[in-house]
Amino acid sequence: IATKVAKWSAHPGLSAANIRAAADASLERLRTDHIDLYYAHEDDLKVEQSEYLHAFDELVQAGKVLRLGASNFSPQRLQSALALSRANNLASFEVSQDHYNLVERKFERTLRPVLEREKLTELPYWSLASGFLTGKYRPGQKVESSRAGAAQKYLARPESAQLLGALDDIAATHRVSVAAVALAWLRAQRTVGAPIASARNLEQLASLFESASLVLDDAELASLARITAPADEA
């Protein structure tokens, strides 16, 4: 069981009092005596890092939380949080959850070096880029979905047609869905433990399950990476 604190209007921020209250409220709603993975949903610049790190440590020492995670932290703030935890012998962030997928790769140049150095695991969200990496959004096709608008921004990119074509080819080779290929690419990246992807129905679940056992070879991984690499790395 994983849950977060900081962004919900009922329990905003990372003050020590709010972290305690939010954790207790989550335990009650989830009907459990502990949270396996508890995230700081975002950093809180209004609160001293030592305050919220001590509050998280208290939850771990009390057995209410087993592991800690950070989400949407800057590299500098994540590094300083880890250093403070280490210096004060506090429970430390072990997982990072950030925006990362085949078409959103800023993470590779910002947070990943910190995770590699500190041996943290990345559990990326929006792994399918608002549905774009499922392959159902194509030029000239209208899809009725709440995510269609977000997916359109990726279709507008000049490399989108080439990327969709490459995904189609690899999916056909392995007889799997495009979504499975995109998730398999992400799972193969350094520091990534498992991509986070959602499904709105049972049909969509099938793609997520088949991706778990799909292994792309080095050539396939590299071919997809080249298409979406930043201009200075292409």
Image: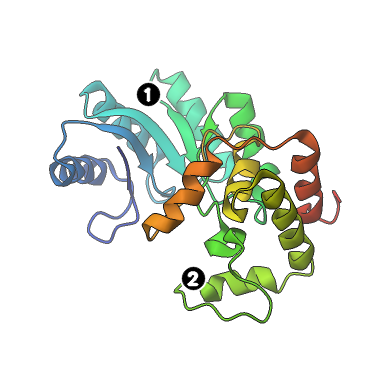
Drawn side of residue 104 relative to residue 58, left or right: right
Q: Is residue 113 visible in the rendered structure shown here? A: yes
Q: Nearer the viewer, residue 63 or 144?
A: 144
Quarter holding the N terminus?
A: top left
Circle 2 residue: 147
Residue at point 57%, 81% (across, down): 142
Please tell me whether mark 1 sits on a helix, a strand or a loop.
Answer: loop
Ranked by sequence position, the earlier of labels 2 and 1 is 1
Identify the amino acid type marked 2.
Answer: Arg
Identify the amino acid type marked 1.
Answer: Ala
Q: Position of residue 61 (x, y in %)?
A: 25, 21
Q: Which mark is residue 91?
A: 1
In three-dimensional space, the C-alpha distance between marks 2 and 1, rounded to whole angstroms, equals 37 Å
Q: Position of residue 233 (x, y in %)?
A: 85, 48
Drawn side of residue 44 relative to residue 163, left or right: left
Q: Residues within 10 Å of mark 2 (few under 14, many from 20)?
A: some
Residue at point 52%, 43% (across, down): 210
Q: Are marks 2 and 1 in contact (CB under 8 Å)?
A: no
Drawn side of residue 165 relative to residue 190, left or right: right
Residue 169: which quarter of the image? Answer: bottom right
Q: Is residue 25 above or below residue 60?
A: below
Q: Nearer the viewer, residue 56 or 144?
A: 144
Q: Which mark is residue 207?
A: none
Q: Residues within 10 Å of mark 1 (few under 14, many from 20)?
A: many
